[in-house]
Image: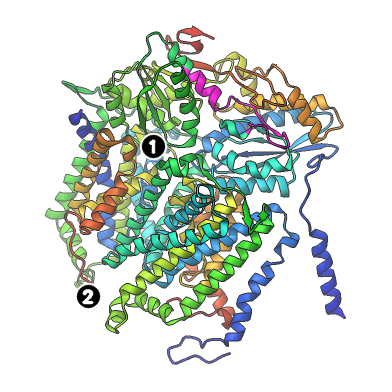
């Protein structure tokens, strides 16, 4: 008898737990909380990019301290992707199916974002890409219309790079040095495309791998080619090594970098003003990283993460955070996923006070941010530029 | 360009030679190949960083202190972690060394994970220009230090009684034990020495490269490639192998394809082991039944 | 059953008892989907993949006793073959799986050549590591075929017309594959061939002097390892849906190695345990981002110091069913 009761209760218990969870309009919501899932590379060799997620989470906490949104505060669930697809998929599935978040916001690694898209998109959970640049994550618009891009996507960035390079008078010979991964391609490929559309083909394309501590061979080859400009799609550490070697061998050609580095930190790492005088980066912000317009945002980050060092990454994701808050407020207290998405689609020309672009989302265009500035050293000071020798 | 590349290759090669040498020293002494060595090199670099940046000590004393600390670590590792598993299968050592490397790397990442750290310019020596050739301060220091180190090692190894002792143990451990040499202590000291050499490599790399937890992995493979090229177990071979590897990387990168720089070490390993497994100076391994 | 033989090793268990224990695990596993959400199910699928990875790797490292790190190469080759066959040639999954197994086997053959030429121990370790990294470079640079760093996506799976889109569907396919492959490996290990392989591990020269062709058995061990891990790679490709070069780097080697050691070198049940635990453990460490490597390293060091024969050795002490004569006593 006892055995049978046991067996029955066992199966009853299993049956009760059975069945996959269905995505719902109000999943992740209670009367007082909104569960948001923040994915990022908090560990692994891309972990410096997770600073953007830190900035975003600081902003959420700031909103919480101001009372939240219509009485609801953010409950942040942070998951690490380590910039690895398998781990990223596990993180995404956990957020969507186990933690059951209301929406997702974050992602720095494009490879991971593409890999997790099949997990997230079918559920209809709203997903705002706050750092990764691969345009295919958000466009073409997915079936459930739930994915939004809150930073310039690769083509926007790359075109900005290409335009800047060509804005220097008499620029004809271009060289490219890049990593061979998809991150570098998302910047350099659209940049090269733009230049080709203006009739200019790169004279040479060289590779530099992650982890190389010496770029002598590449620098010497570039020097021999008598170039007018160099496109450098390299991570922070390798950029420093390249610039150091460029100075060493007196390669004085201007270098156009990506949004993966920022001027102040590059200078700090090189310790040599002369080596960075010819270096330009994509600058997504309205002001310098430590400029007056950014102070408010940097202070928010430091309030909740006092040990954090502010770099060019820190505030990037906060802009899409501002947009998200706007949309959530606009919905009102009766919040559902569809209403959230509808409000996001209405965002038009939103000046976030952080990014150089205005965010505009439409039902058919999810690339919200299409503009970026460039920054370079003018008279030894980092300056935001719109084109060669023209301030923003 | 050839001269400049050669100079650069020599500098890189000197670093690889140092790492290969420290690996070989350990291998000869204990027949263990330290798969975690790359991360110990990192340990030296980070050790100096901590001392210089956080404690404010000047560079040279920090370097010395970091080296001594790594030497100490070596002894601790030998005593506490290698000795107890001596009786187990050989792959246990490989796994232990990998795990140790992992622990080093993990500690570094846990403490400083998201940041990338610069070392301030340590020696501000103006580069020397010989015609088109640029000889930078880094080149001079690295090649200088490594050459001095190698000379010192060679002197100790071949001329002093300690060196003779080492040679004796290398040739026959059992024989050495029979005549009363404390081989166990020798192992401990050799671990310390190998780690210290590796740490010096890290200290030399630190000012010219940024510090991040994954610094070590690349150096490990190059150390292996250098050892393979020179012949496993040959001290001189390790050095020669390192230099040749450094040069090969630069030449293939400049004259063939910049994408090859990364895999030069792998190609060297495969080609050498297929064509001439003993490398340049290695000895035939005879298995006695 | 009790009673030790003269050599001190425990007597084998009745075959029927062993078989029932062996099949109990997959039968129990079949109930997992009843109470697992998509995330847990994904993890279960991942465990199945890594069970096979560990089984394959353990064959070469534990049973043959060679320090050959070609595992990630087999894994990657299996995954990429599957992806290429499915997306470029349009083959269905089960055909691509077979091709992946063959490709893995061929890679194993290639890897065995170095072992045959007398390259042993650390040389073998290093050359196989180099082989793995070289393959990764190939995946990255042969981007016309492999799509390089963008990753090569797999078209949706279907089983003879029935589309498989959920983790649960994949689970039952993977479970079936895993059971078949593990059973086959088990049969191999229990056969004369298996015993010869282990004899080579224990003393190669003596084995050769007994008239057993060491060359044939070494090649066989490598090829079978390649086949098993190639199949695991095919499963991995289906699991993640997109194959990237970075998934098959040096870190992956360490993970595989750890699975073998934690589970128990040379032990089949150990491979299963190692694959399961070391897939689950990093998920537990999610709450401490960035600390994973540290914990991993410490755990392995502890296993090496205190439990060198892996978890399987504990099981062996508990019940005679788990005592395998696969590892060196």
Residue range in magenta is A138-162
Q: Is residue A26 above or below residue A295?
A: below
Extreme residue toward the left, this view? B159
Residue C258 appears anywhere in the view = no
Answer whether residue A275 is magenta in the image: no
Label 2 – label 1 distance at C-alpha: 44 Å
> Of C198 and B235, which appears nearest the observer?
C198
Q: Quadrant of the N terminus of chain B?
A: top left
Viewer-nearest of discs 2 and 1: 1
Task: Locate residue A387, reporting x and y percent.
Answer: 49, 11
| Chain containing mark 2 | B
> In the rendered image, which quarter is residue A19 located in?
bottom right
> Of C264 and B103, which appears nearest the observer?
C264
Residue at 57% of width from left, 83% of height from top? C320
| Chain containing mark 1 | A
Residue at 74% of width from left, 28% of height from top? A63
Q: List the residue tagged with mark 1.
A: A209
Residue at 64% of width from left, 27% of height from top? A150
Q: Is residue C63 above or below residue A175?
A: below
Q: Which mark is residue B288?
A: 2
Residue A147 appears anywhere in the view = yes
Q: Quadrant of the C terminus of chain B?
A: bottom left
Q: Secondary structure at mark 2?
A: loop
Whether labels 2 and 1 share one chain: no
Is residue B19 found left or right of A362 in the rendered image? Answer: left
Could you classify mark 1 by the number of other residues whose Cα lies within 10 Å: few (under 14), some (14-19), or many (20 or more)?
many
């Amino acid at each position: 008898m006892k055995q049978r009761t046991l067996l029955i209760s066992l199966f009853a218990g299993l049956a009760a737990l059975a069945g996959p969870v269905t995505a719902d309009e109000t999943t992740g919501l209670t009367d007082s909380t909104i569960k948001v899932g923040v994915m990022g590379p908090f560990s692994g060799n891309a972990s410096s990019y997770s600073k953007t997620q830190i900035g975003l989470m600081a902003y959420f906490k700031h909103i919480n301290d101001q009372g939240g949104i219509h009485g609801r505060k953010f409950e942040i669930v942070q998951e690490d992707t380590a910039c690895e697809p398998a781990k990223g998929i596990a993180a995404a599935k956990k957020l969507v199916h186990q933690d059951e978040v209301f929406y997702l916001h974050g992602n720095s690694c494009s490879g991971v974002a593409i890999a997790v898209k099949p997990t997230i998109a079918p559920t209809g959970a709203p997903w705002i890409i706050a750092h990764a640049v691969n345009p295919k994550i958000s466009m073409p618009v997915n079936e459930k219309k739930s994915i939004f891009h809150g930073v310039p996507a690769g083509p926007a960035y790359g075109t900005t790079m290409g335009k800047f390079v060509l804005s220097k008078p008499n620029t004809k010979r271009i060289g490219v040095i890049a990593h061979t991964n998809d991150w570098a391609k998302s910047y350099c490929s659209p940049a090269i495309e733009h230049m080709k559309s203006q009739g200019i083909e790169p004279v040479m394309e060289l590779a530099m791998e992650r982890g190389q501590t010496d770029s002598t061979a590449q620098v010497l080859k570039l020097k021999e080619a008598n170039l007018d400009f160099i496109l450098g799609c390299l991570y922070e550490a390798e950029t420093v090594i390249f610039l150091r070697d460029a100075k060493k061998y007196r390669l004085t050609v201007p270098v156009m970098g990506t949004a993966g580095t920022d001027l102040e930190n590059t200078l700090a790492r090189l310790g040599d003003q002369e080596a960075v005088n010819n270096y330009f980066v994509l600058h997504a912000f309205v002001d310098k990283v430590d400029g007056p317009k950014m102070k408010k945002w940097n202070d928010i980050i430091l309030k909740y993460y006092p040990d954090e060092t502010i770099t060019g990454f820190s505030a990037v994701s906060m802009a899409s955070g501002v947009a998200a808050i706007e949309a959530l407020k606009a919905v009102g207290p009766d919040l559902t996923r569809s209403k959230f998405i509808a409000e996001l689609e209405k965002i038009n020309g939103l000046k976030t006070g952080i990014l150089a672009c205005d965010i505009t989302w439409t039902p058919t265009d999810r690339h919200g941010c299409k503009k970026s500035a460039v920054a370079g050293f003018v008279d030894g000071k980092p300056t935001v530029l719109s084109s060669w020798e023209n301030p923003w | 360009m050839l001269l400049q590349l050669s100079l650069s290759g020599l500098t890189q090669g000197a670093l690889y030679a140092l790492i290969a040498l420290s690996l070989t020293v350990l291998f000869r002494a204990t027949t263990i190949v330290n798969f975690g060595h790359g991360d110990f090199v990192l340990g030296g670099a980070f050790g100096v960083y901590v001392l210089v940046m956080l404690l404010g000590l000047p560079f040279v004393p920090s370097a010395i202190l970091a080296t001594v600390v790594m030497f100490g670590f070596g002894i601790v590792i030998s005593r506490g972690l290698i000795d107890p598993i001596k009786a187990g299968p050989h792959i246990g050592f490989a796994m232990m060394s990998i795990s140790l490397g992992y622990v080093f790397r993990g500690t570094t990442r846990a403490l400083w994970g998201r940041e990338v750290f610069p070392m301030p310019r340590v020696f501000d020596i103006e580069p020397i220009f010989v015609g088109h050739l640029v000889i930078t301060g880094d080149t001079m220091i690295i090649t200088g230090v490594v050459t001095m180190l190698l000379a010192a090692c060679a002197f100790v190894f071949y001329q002093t009684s300690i060196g003779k002792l080492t040679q004796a143990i290398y040739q026959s451990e059992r024989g050495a034990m029979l005549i009363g040499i404390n081989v166990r202590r020798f192992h401990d000291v050799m671990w310390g020495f190998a780690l210290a050499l590796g740490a010096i490599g890290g200290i030399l790399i630190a000012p010219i490269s940024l510090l991040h937890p994954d610094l070590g992995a690349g150096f490990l493979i190059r150390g292996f490639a250098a050892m393979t090229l020179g012949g496993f177990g040959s001290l001189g071979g390790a050095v020669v192998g390192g230099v040749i590897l450094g040069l090969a990387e630069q030449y293939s990168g400049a004259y063939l394809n910049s994408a090859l720089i990364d895999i030069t070490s792998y190609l060297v390993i495969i080609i050498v082991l297929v064509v001439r497994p003993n490398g340049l100076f290695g000895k035939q391994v005879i298995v006695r039944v | 059953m009790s009673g030790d033989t003269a050599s001190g090793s425990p007597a084998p268990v009745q075959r029927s008892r062993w078989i029932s224990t062996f099949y109990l695990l997959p039968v129990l596993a079949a109930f997992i989907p009843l109470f697992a959400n998509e995330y847990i199910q994904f993890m279960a699928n991942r465990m199945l993949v890594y069970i096979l990875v560990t089984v394959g790797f353990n064959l070469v490292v534990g049973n043959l006793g060679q320090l050959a790190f070609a595992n990630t190469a087999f894994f990657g080759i299996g995954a990429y073959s599957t992806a290429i066959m499915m997306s470029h040639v349009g083959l269905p999954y089960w055909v691509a799986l077979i091709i992946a197994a063959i490709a893995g086997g061929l890679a194993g053959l290639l890897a065995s050549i170095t072992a045959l030429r007398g390259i042993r121990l650390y040389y073998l370790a290093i050359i196989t590591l180099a082989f793995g990294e070289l393959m990764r470079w190939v995946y990255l640079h042969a981007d016309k075929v492999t799509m390089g760093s963008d990753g090569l996506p797999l078209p949706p799976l279907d089983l003879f017309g029935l589309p498989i889109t959920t983790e649960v569907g994949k689970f039952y396919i993977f479970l079936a594959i895993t059971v078949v492959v593990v059973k086959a490996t088990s049969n191999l290990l229990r056969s004369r061939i298996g015993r010869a392989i282990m004899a080579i591990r224990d003393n190669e020269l003596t084995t050769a002097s007994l008239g057993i062709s060491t060359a044939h058995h070494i090649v066989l061990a490598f090829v079978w390892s390649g086949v098993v891990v190639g199949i695991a790679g095919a499963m991995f490709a289906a699991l993640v849906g997109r194959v990237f070069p970075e998934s098959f780097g040096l870190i992956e080697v360490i993970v595989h190695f750890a699975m073998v050691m934690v589970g128990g070198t040379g032990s089949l049940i150990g491979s299963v345990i190692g694959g399961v635990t070391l897939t689950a453990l990093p998920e537990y460490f999610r709450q401490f981002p960035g600390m994973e490597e540290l914990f991993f390293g410490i755990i392995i060091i502890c296993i090496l110091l205190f439990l060198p024969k892996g978890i399987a050795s504990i099981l062996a002490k508990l019940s005679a069913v788990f005592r395998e004569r696969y590892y060196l006593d």
